[in-house]
Each structure stands twice: as C-alpha cells, then as structure tokens.
Amino acid sequence: MPTTPSCTTPLCTTPYVAPNAGDRLPLLIVGSGLAGLTVALELADQQPVMILAKRSLSDSATAWAQGGIVGVLDEKDDTQAHVRDTLDAGAGLVVEAVAQHIAQHSADVIRWLQAHGVPFTTDPSGPEGLHLVKEGGHSHRRIAHAADATGKAIHEVLLDKAREHPNITLLEGWMAIDIITRRHLSHRRPGPPKPAKACYGLYALNLETGHVEAMPAAGVVLATGGVGKVYRYTSNPETATGDGVAMAWRAGCRIANMEFIQFHPTCLYHPQDRSFLITEALRGEGATLELPDGTRFMPQHDARAELAPRDIVARAIDFEMKRHGVDFVHLNATHLGEAFLKAHFPTIHARCEALGIDIATQPIPVVPAAHYTCGGVVTDLDGQTDLPGLYAVGESGYTGLHGANRLASNSLLECVVIGQNAAQVILRADPIDNQPVLAWDESQVEDADEAVVISHNWDELRLLMWNYVGIVRTNRRLERALHRIELLKDEVQEYYANFRVSRDLLELRNLLECAELIVRSALMRKESRGLHFSRDYPKTWPVAYPTILTPIKGREGNSRPL
C-alpha cells in the first residue's frame, strides 16, 4: 500500500457559481458520504445545498463499509439491549442518553433507507423480511446488510437521489481549506452586531486550476470522515485525512477523545492490497482466528472469542503476532463452504480470489489496521459545534455515542440519525446574510519547487504514528512522537506560508494537526481504557472522563487572508 500522498490523477472539477447579491445562500456540505448525503436530502426541498468532494463523489468511507447498519427490528430484540451493548463496548465513556436516542431511531433509519431504495439482503422469515446478522459486541442479530457491500449499496442509492435533486449542487475536485469566521470579513455592514464566533462559509481549493475560492454559505456541515490516513496501515480510503477535525480546531472548536482510534482486527494482509477490510460479519458467521500453524487463540483472550469487541480482538492479534514473531494471523472461514461464502460474502470472495486466495479452501491472512476515529469535533445531538452555523456529522463529529470503542455497525446509524437532526435544526436557524469576505491572498507566495518535502514528511508522519501511537502505547513513545510532530508542523507551516497550496500539502497539514490532537489526548489519559492501552498505566480508573481539548485563544483561524 503506498504511503506517499494521494494519487496524482487529474480531476475534472465542477465549476463553482458564486451566489449573486440578494440570492439565498446555500448550505455547504464538505464530504459526500452517508452523513453529508443525509443532511442534503433532508434539506434540499427547502434549502439550496452544495456538496464538496475533494476527489470524486464516489470516494468516501461509506462506500467502503462492508458489514451493515444496526436496526433493532426483531421482536426478540429491543433498544435497551442495543444500548447495553453500546455501553459495554464503549468501556464506560458512552453518553447513555445519546446511545438511547440513536438506538430508538434505528428501525426508522432502516425504513428510511428502504424508502429511498437501498437493496438490503432479504429473508422471508426474517424481521420485516430482512436478513439480519450478528457482529462482535452485539447480543442479537440486528445488522441489516446488502450482502458484504452495504456501504456501497447505500451510497450509490443516495448519491443518485442527490444527483436527481434540482436543489443540490455537487462539486467534485474541490478541497475545503478553512472555515470563514467573522475575522475573515472585509468590513462590517450596518445593522445589529454579528456574533463574534460564527461560521460564514469556507475557503476551498479548485484542484484543477489551483484557484482558491471564498464560498459564503448559510452554514457549513463537516462530513469529512475520520483520520485513518495518519497511520501507515489503514482500512480507510485516501480521503480520510482529518480535514473536518483540523478545520474545526483551527476555527476554535473543542475536540474530544482523539486518543481512541479503532483498529479493525481483520484487514487483508497481502503485498498487492493492504487496505481491504475483511468484515466482522464473517466472524459473526463463525470464522475463527488462528496462528499460521492453525492454532486458534481468541478463546484464551476473551470468553466471547472472535465476537469480543474490536479493541479486545485487535490487541489479542497484536499480542499473538509479537509473541510468535509473525507478520499476520489467519481468519479461517473454510468450514462455511463455497456456496455460503459466495452468497453472503461475494465481494470478499472475489477480491481474495483475484489475489490468489480461495477463501473456501484457504484461510485469509489478516492484520489489524486503523479503521475508525471515535473522537472528533464536539457536537450535540443535532450536530451543532461550538461555532454557530458550523455542524459536524458522521465520523468527524463527537456525540459521545462511541465512547472508548465503537460498537460494530453503529457508525452508519449515527450518520443518518445525527444528519437528520442537523437538517431540522438548520431549517429552523436564522438565515445568514451574504457577508463581504476577504479574498484569498497569494501575493506573497510562489509555486512549490520541492514537492519531495511533502512526500517525505507524509511518509515519516504515518510511520511514526504507526510505531509510536498504535494499538499499545507508552509515554516515552508518545513524547517522542509529539516532539517530531511539532517539528514537522513547523516545516509544513513554513511551506504553507511560502508556496501555493495543493491537495497534498493541505492534507498533510490537516493530518499533522490531527496527529498532535491524538498524541496530546493520549498523554492526558493516565489509564488504559477501550482503544487506548498504555503499558505505563495498565489499570482502568473506576470513573471515566472524556478527554476534551480546547483551542488556545488567538490561535484559531490560521488562514492566508489574515
């Protein structure tokens, strides 16, 4: 898997048309995954919407999600059982009221997606005609899925709906740089004073022309996903560079629980494909984890064996790999049979077959990989951040649902519930006037002549995060990582100040911001809990507290127009 910055394939960007004076400002949504599409579709009948994608609209973590989405539909199941499972997986840091709210809406979310045309796998004898599966940490079968490509099925359907809607503008090849706040306004108009902290739009880079546009907006929704690309090995797409978290932090918003990075236990280990996820649903159907010699090991680590929460399974695999000096372990599903595997896991079967692995007769080599960011921009249940007019939904936001470890398949559910809530609040919000904004200043910069600096720093960051801030941590490693991150940030900031911006530069800038947030959060937690395991503090405190980081006043908004 390449560690260098994103691919250099040229993008044909969609033209941006700025609103005229007196026009109703659009809502800007950064990110084209499930969270952003939910907000857009819920708003578009009453509010113009623009969705920005820095790559193609199809590039999102949603499209990579295999397992499914939680739906409490079985009469033998109930929302309280779902809440208990969420609380248990979250290791004492889940906000119970949030878990209650999300669980209570799960059945309605499945029906909402069905109404839009999502083709979930059916079972005539199943609840509401659906085939439900069980994943790690769940006490019941409650995962609705579309074979083993649920995210792709959901994303394609909703993206088609967005393309058809006349009030939704889709912009490909545009990368958001920073949030426009009051300090970016060129002058104050007569009338009532504006709030000191408010969001008026954002600056965005046209990746084809290199031109930076100031985009005024009625509000901004950050739906940019997580920070997986800060690590050497990740199951995330190239888009997962923490853009929303970094922009919100620079704009003055609080960030929470960034130390809790979920490592998915089973990512394919193959020289030609090290970012392909092997869904947890395969273990839910009986696949077992084994050492290369065929010895099963999970029962020695947890009574729930392969169906223990992800943090436990990932640490167990990491322990066994280090103990036996192996580069991977095996996930054995051969006993399920070829017909079953092809019917229920066609994507995995086809991908492995293309790489020379017949999963019906051979175990799958797997390793843990950075998968999900449990922390993010602090929001309420409506996705509202500390900055009026700025919202964060999906993986970029922190509602308190995931605590110290996300329960499988809660992520897609949260995207829809919080996205729908945010849409309702946005519709009720007071309109924001089209304010005069400072233009992006490139008068003191020039074209970059040493792109190798970005490539080298990108590689170094991802490797040091993998080695020093991975599944098992120590204070010494964290302090070394922080020292080097600070030096890299200084180098990149100097580069940012003197050269025209590019996608690779902006993504590296954001990843460094997020890396520092992860490390500082980890250093603040003097215990081991959930996804954060420290050899220096192996015990868990009897009382759990979230890690909240607050920007230093005066640092926020570090953008060119200033």
Image: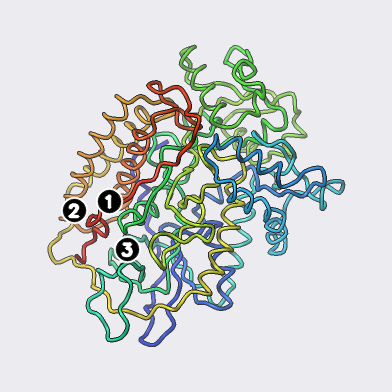
Answer left or right for 484 relative to 357: left
Q: Quadrant of the N terminus?
A: top left
Answer left or right for 517 relative to 79: left
Query: Please, is residue 88 above or below residue 115 in the view?
Result: above
Instruction: Give the residue drawn at x 82%, y 42%.
Output: 76
The residue singled out by tag 2 in the image is 448
Instruction: Give the residue drawn at x 58%, y 74%.
Output: 165
| CA distance for labels 2 and 3 | 16 Å
| CA distance for labels 1 and 3 | 12 Å
Task: Please give the label number shown on residue 505.
Answer: 1
| CA distance for labels 1 and 2 | 10 Å
Give the class, few, some or many, for how many residues have Cα within 10 Å of label 1's Cα (few <14, many ≥20): many
Task: Report helix, strand or loop for mark 3.
Answer: strand
- x, y percentage for residue 465? 35, 33
Instruction: Give the residue drawn at x 69%, y 38%.
Output: 345
Q: Say if mark 1 contacts mark 2, CB within 8 Å.
A: yes
Between discs 1 and 2, the one toward the N terminus: 2
Between discs 2 and 3, the one toward the N terminus: 3
Residue 366 visible here: yes
Report which quarter residue 278 is drawn in.
top right
**Hey, what amino acid is under mark 1?**
Leu
| Residue found farthest to the front | 543
Report which quarter residue 89 is drawn in.
top right
